Image (spheres, rainbow, N blue to C red):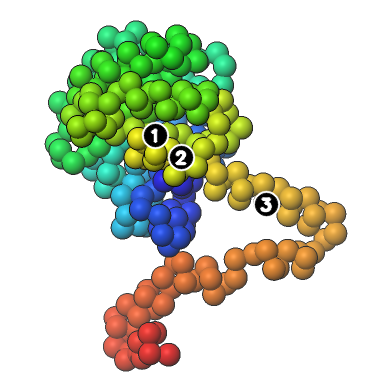
Amino acid sequence: MPGAFNALCARAIERAGFEAVYISGAGLSNAVFSLPDVGLTTLSEATRHAKTICNAVEIPVLADADTGFGEAVNVARTVMEMEQTGLAGIHLEDQVLPKKCGHLDGKEVVPCDAMVQKVRAAVAARRDKSFVLVARTDARTIEGFDHALDRAKRYLDAGADAIFPEALESPQEFAAFAEQLRGIGPTSAPGRPPLLLANMTEFGKSPLLSTSELSDMGYRMVIFPQTALRVAYGAIWHMLQDLKRVGHQRDWINRMQTRAELYELLDYDELKAIDDAASGVRREPVSSK
């Protein structure tokens, strides 16, 4: 699941053939508000962002719900609000507010019991049983691998559908985490681990493994939360520097999305057909041209 930082990016992900879209909390903070990912966005901002993206695509969308925007009762409200946006699911983490990016030092985690309460509240508040609740643990960096694994087991016992172990530090840790969870939780098939999500964010603590490598280990979801944003804003930054230096954009034309490509991504012809129908204009179908 590549991360979408806006609706147009989500549509590009869908057109590229991916089966699902991911909404990163960092992407929301960075791209929409120009803020660091330290828990400064609100539930209403996150739900509005999610709804915009869900409306743009037909494939499932999973969203980062940070710490649930408060304690257990706040998590319940978060689940209710997020369900109404059209999301397929969310993930909740066990960090202390104000939270930090999962790959930065200086994080803190809440007591395991407190996170268990949040998971139980999320399960109780859920109305659509197909709405996926992913429990993320940031304990690996703080308490160690074994504590992160113990937390995962307790979150599954509390009703989480899937587990997201943040900031594992080697291929061996990814493999061992999946192996130790075989047969545990409601979503684990005989001899297989439960639903597991791997985060392949760049410049972090985890190695960048391929989807096939992770699949072989037992992971069934892989997110690339900031990949599209980093590529896009890297290109924008270099273009702006060049534009300031030379005073024209001609050298960048071959690296741009064309007007036709943008209109195709936006389904411009479909909107034009609706406009023509409203005006009583008969129009030859695009497919016959």
The answer to whether 179 appears left or right of 225 in the picture is left
At label 2, the amino acid type is Glu
State the SS at label 3: helix
Cα gap from disc 2 to disc 1, whole angstroms: 7 Å
Mark identifier at residue 235: 3
Q: Residues within 10 Å of mark 2 (few under 14, many from 20)?
A: few
> Which tag is nearer the camera, tag 2 or tag 3?
2
The answer to whether 145 appears left or right of 115 in the picture is right
Q: Residue placed at 82% from the left, 61% from the top?
A: 247
Mark identifier at residue 209: none
Cα gap from disc 2 to disc 3, whole angstroms: 29 Å
Residue position marked by numbered label 1 in the rendering:
217
Question: x, y percentage for residue 213?
Answer: 46, 40
Q: Residues within 10 Å of mark 1 (few under 14, many from 20)?
A: many
Q: Residue placed at 50% from the left, 29% from the top?
A: 171
Cα gap from disc 1 to disc 3, whole angstroms: 34 Å
Asked whether residue 23 is in view, the answer is: no
Cβ–Cβ below 8 Å for labels 2 and 1?
Answer: yes
Quarter of the picture containing the C terminus is bottom left
Q: Residue placed at 28% from the left, 39% from the top?
A: 89
Q: Nearer the viewer, residue 220 or 24?
A: 220
Q: Residues within 10 Å of mark 3 (few under 14, many from 20)?
A: few
Question: x, y percentage for residue 80?
Answer: 22, 34
State the SS at label 1: helix
Residue position marked by numbered label 2 in the rendering:
213
State the SS at label 2: helix
At label 1, the amino acid type is Met
Check the image and report above or below for 30 versus 19: above
